[in-house]
Image (spheres, rainbow, N blue to C red):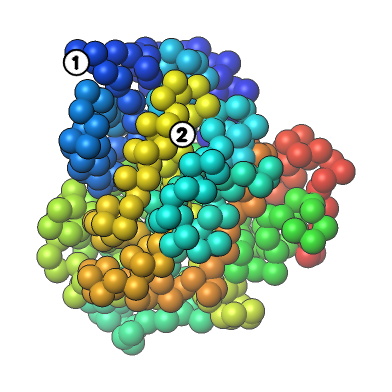
Amino acid sequence: MLSKGLRLACAGAAVAVGLTACSSSSSSGSGGKTLKVAYQKFGNEIHVDAHMQKVKAQFEAAHPGIKIQLDPINVSENDYYTKIDLMMGSSSTAPDVVYEDTFLINSDIQAGYLTPLDSYLSTWSDWSQFPDTAKAAARGLDGKTYGVPMGTDTRALYYNKDLLTKAGIAMPWQPKTWADVVAAAKAVKANDPGVIPMNIYAGKPDGEGSTMQGFEMLLYGTQDTLYNSASKKWIAPSKGFSDSLQFLKDAYSGGLTLPPQQELDPNVGNVVGGQLLPQSKLAIDLDGSWVTSTWTPTGAKPWPAWSSTLGEAAMPTQDGGGKGTMSMSGGWTLSVTAKSKNKDLAAQFVELALNKDNSASYDVADGQIAVRNDVAADPTYQNSNPTTAFFTGLVPVTNYRPAYAEYPKVSDAIQVAMEAVITGQSSPADAMKSYTESLKGIVGSSNVAAGTS
């Protein structure tokens, strides 16, 4: 992922991602206003678009003369971040409502891209249905709220029950350590060399997906993290960081994963969820709770047998210590941009899009963990997916990213380290040293302290 400065300075990127020049306050043919809504639509991720189409119809019916202009951005994750930054940086291109990853909230606040919503939310009765943990996901360091959460997620191991059974692994499978995960992958490889033993995202093209689903799902299972909230220091170097890179090196160099060149394809997530898992060509996938939405009748790649073919296992900690298992959680919000000329209408759109009924339908369709109390308690939601109880049950062992303004650059540095290791360009030790120096450059040397050794 590009840093803020690089994103805005890279004029060529604007051409590459096809920046649309259209005003967020343009007049519609009926003499009313046009409200522009920007979000990602890429590969198997089609449910946000379906949700926005639904809310557009509702909003226009309730607001005669107002037109909703949807802007589904068909690019990979990193390119999406780049494009919306470029759009939000200019009053002529800024959307009114933007689909925002929570880890970018503080960096986008710092860049002046987002509008605080507190004055709107204070009069929205539904806001009381969002627990404090959900509200915190879109709260800036200034204490103001800059978005309404659409849902949250957790991460775990999906596994093909038949492939693991044939490899001699008893069902149900719940590894207790990293070594157990590796042992299962090696057993699959030995039994059927034509099957990819496991998938762990690890390349820059998958952006934050690699950082969260890949690296942080390892690191936060060690005795180290990225940031120490008590000392207010970023952590580097550390044994946990080095061990996480070593795990990736061993997995990739040992032929237990996708080949590096395939992992570095920006479309890898769509291939994993849309082809490899449904075709029983992948045995173990470290991935997110939302992946099942790809296989539902309304998903991009319907797969009726997924719930009987796949099992789910919590990711173990490195040596089984701590809570024994772990997860990472994130999520997306709908936010109002600072340069919107229609902030009142934009806030109304966000509130409509995330009322109880619309939140429930979206959470069910997209495999989201509900963040509204009333949706979470709804039997229809609870019974909507065979994995809902499992992934919700990981919340007590989950971890959250240190979503400070510097985090996007830190995440980019992590991706650089991962990619250097899986491609053999660097040893884990050297990659960690390079990351440590990059981290000091990002947050300042005085804000970095070593972890365990």
In the figure, residue 169 lies in which quadrant? Answer: bottom left
At horizontal 24% and vertical 41% (from top left) the residue drawn is 55
At horizontal 76% and vertical 34% (from top left) the residue drawn is 441
- Residue type at mark 2: give it: Val
| Label 2 residue SS | strand
Q: Which residue is mark 1?
A: 30
- Residue type at mark 1: give it: Ser
Residue 444 lies, in percent from the top left, at 81, 38
Residue 129 lies, in percent from the top left, at 43, 62
| Label 1 residue SS | loop
Mark 2 neighbour density, 10 Å: few (under 14) some (14–19) many (20 or more)? many
Indicate which disc residue 336 carries.
2
Give left or right: position of 354 versus 310: right
Image quadrant in which the C terminus is located: bottom right
Mark 1 neighbour density, 10 Å: few (under 14) some (14–19) many (20 or more)? few
- Rendered position, 451 above or below 18: below
Q: Which residue is outermost to the front?
A: 123
For marks 1 and 2, give the CA distance.
24 Å
At horizontal 82% and vertical 45% (from top left) the residue drawn is 447
Between 65 and 233, the residue placed more toward the observer is: 65
Indicate which disc residue 292 carries.
none
- Rendered position, 169 above or below 113: below
Between 24 and 444, the residue placed more toward the observer is: 24
At horizontal 67% and vertical 39% (from top left) the residue drawn is 406
